[in-house]
Amino acid sequence: MKPYELVSATSTDPRVQELLVRHGIPPSRVKLKRGSHDIGIEVPEGGFDLVFTLVEAVPSMVRGGLSEGALVLSAVFLYPEATGKHAGFRQGLPEGLTAEMTRDDVSALLGPPDSVSPVFPNDRWDRDDGRSLIVDFSEDGQRMTLVTLQISDA
């Protein structure tokens, strides 16, 4: 299972637990510090990072049936190319994206974005399942630098 397919699953979901173990992360590491509502887990050798958020802090459409205090996988950050810290994500990007795509290529594939950041070179597509796909680009738009799948805050 690809990490981005698990967005909105809980930290106790067996698929999430298996993903963590496969990358050498003890599932017990996914716990909040006092006063926090989320925790980030870096997986640099896998080319991705994870964010788990307290269920009470995610939109109500995701909460259905989840216990108070549960931690939900709220965001997955994928690095299409290797960075100084992360390997390139090599499990296949979501929705047909490939690491070589430009901003124009991504828009041609996914259609016009639902929003374009006025500050950062990134575009956002909101999905009907309560998730958003955000693609960050180099300043010139010639390469993707980060692909994020997250629970939509809209």
Image (cartoon, helix red, strand yellow):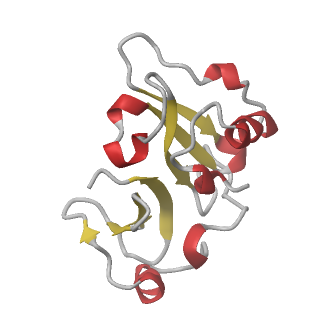
Left or right relative to 21: residue 4: left
Which quadrant would residue 5 be assigned to in this image?
bottom right
Coordinates of residue 50 in the picture (x, y in percent): 55, 41
Furthest residue in direction top, as rendered? 34
Left or right relative to 56: residue 44: right
Q: Quadrant of the N terminus?
A: bottom right
Left or right relative to 132: residue 80: right
Furthest residue in direction front, as rendered? 65
Which quadrant would residue 96 be assigned to in this image?
bottom right
Instruction: Name the residue nearer the viewer: 130 or 103.
Output: 130
Residue at coordinates 49% horizontally, 73% vertically from top-left?
Answer: 143
Relative to 5, residue 141 above or below: below
Coordinates of residue 88 in the picture (x, y in percent): 66, 58
Instruction: Name the residue nearer the viewer: 61 or 2.
Output: 61
Residue 96 seen anywhere in this rendered image of the structure: yes
Left or right relative to 102: residue 95: right
Relative to 23, residue 142 above or below: below
Instruction: Name the residue nearer the viewer: 58 or 148.
Output: 58
Coordinates of residue 29 in the picture (x, y in percent): 64, 21
Residue at coordinates 71% horizontally, 48% vertically from top-left?
Answer: 46
Residue at coordinates 59% horizontally, 36% vertically from top-left?
Answer: 42
